[in-house]
Amino acid sequence: MGQQWRELQQWVFPTRFFRENLGLGEGGEGGEEGLDNDIVRRTFERTGASVMGKRMFDAGELMWPEDAPFHTPVFVVTHEERDPWERPGGTTFHFVNDGVGTALDRAREAAGARDVRIAGGGATILEYVNAGLVDEFTVALSPVLFGSGIRLFEGVDADRVALEQAAWTRRSGRPT
């Protein structure tokens, strides 16, 4: 799983902003500027809280450094009762076991005027999309399979969800 997780995230680790965020080099030492860096920086700057599912949390808990990369409150949708888990750098994981609506309400309150990011995984994103609770989302594609995976748009109620392409980008200099 660790190798697949690294492959999935391979596009973000070389960016200057993410390297600084993880403390992998002062001033983005060795970090790349450009489109990917700008997307990551803007996403983190506008995010005031995040929501994720239990499976994503379980995978990340093993992979994230002690100073988890969020630096905001994170609300984990789960059936498990657990005390908040505070990490250095401003990340506190709160475990919400009474539904996606409650997790989103708590995240909105914590985020204030900033955005709430539905970080994943696929089943959690799908639940929010089908509930009509997603205003905008960004999809980064990586050529990695996790078992049979969860198809992000499988089961979307097309009668209730309308998609509109707001932007499209393609990295240059890399295979597509």
Image: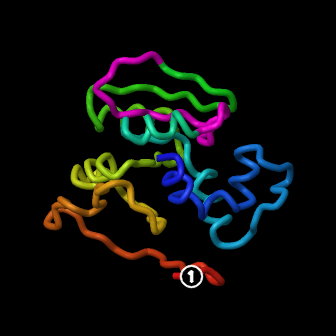
- Amino acid type for the residue under numbered disc 1: Pro
Name the dominant secondary structure of the magenta segment. loop
- The picture quadrant where one finds residue 174 is bottom right
Q: Position of residue 151 (x, y in %)?
A: 28, 60
- The picture quadrant where one finds residue 70 is top right
Task: Say whether residue 40 is left or right of residue 96.
Answer: right
The type of colouring in the image is rainbow
* Residue 47 to residue 136: above or below: above
Disc 1 element: loop
* Residue 158 to residue 124: above or below: below
Q: Position of residue 127 (x, y in %)?
A: 25, 48
Question: In this picture, which residue range is highlighted in magenta?
Answer: 64-83
- The picture quadrant where one finds residue 9 is bottom right
User: How busy is the neighbourhood of tag 1: few (under 14 within 10 Å), some, or many (20 plus)?
Assistant: few
Residue farthest toward the left in the current orientation of the protein:
159
Please give the name of the residue rendered at 53% of the width and 44% of the height, measured from the top-left corner. 113
In the image, 59 versus 105, the foreground residue is 59
Please give the name of the residue rendered at 82% of the width and 50% of the height, measured from the top-left corner. 25
Q: Where does label 1 land, which residue?
A: 175
Q: Position of residue 109 (x, y in %)?
A: 45, 33
* Residue 54 to residue 38: above or below: above
Please give the name of the residue rendered at 36% of the width and 27% of the height, measured from the top-left corner. 96
Q: Is residue 35 magenta?
A: no
Q: Position of residue 7 (x, y in %)?
A: 54, 59
Please give the name of the residue rendered at 62% of the width and 26% of the height, measured from the top-left corner. 87
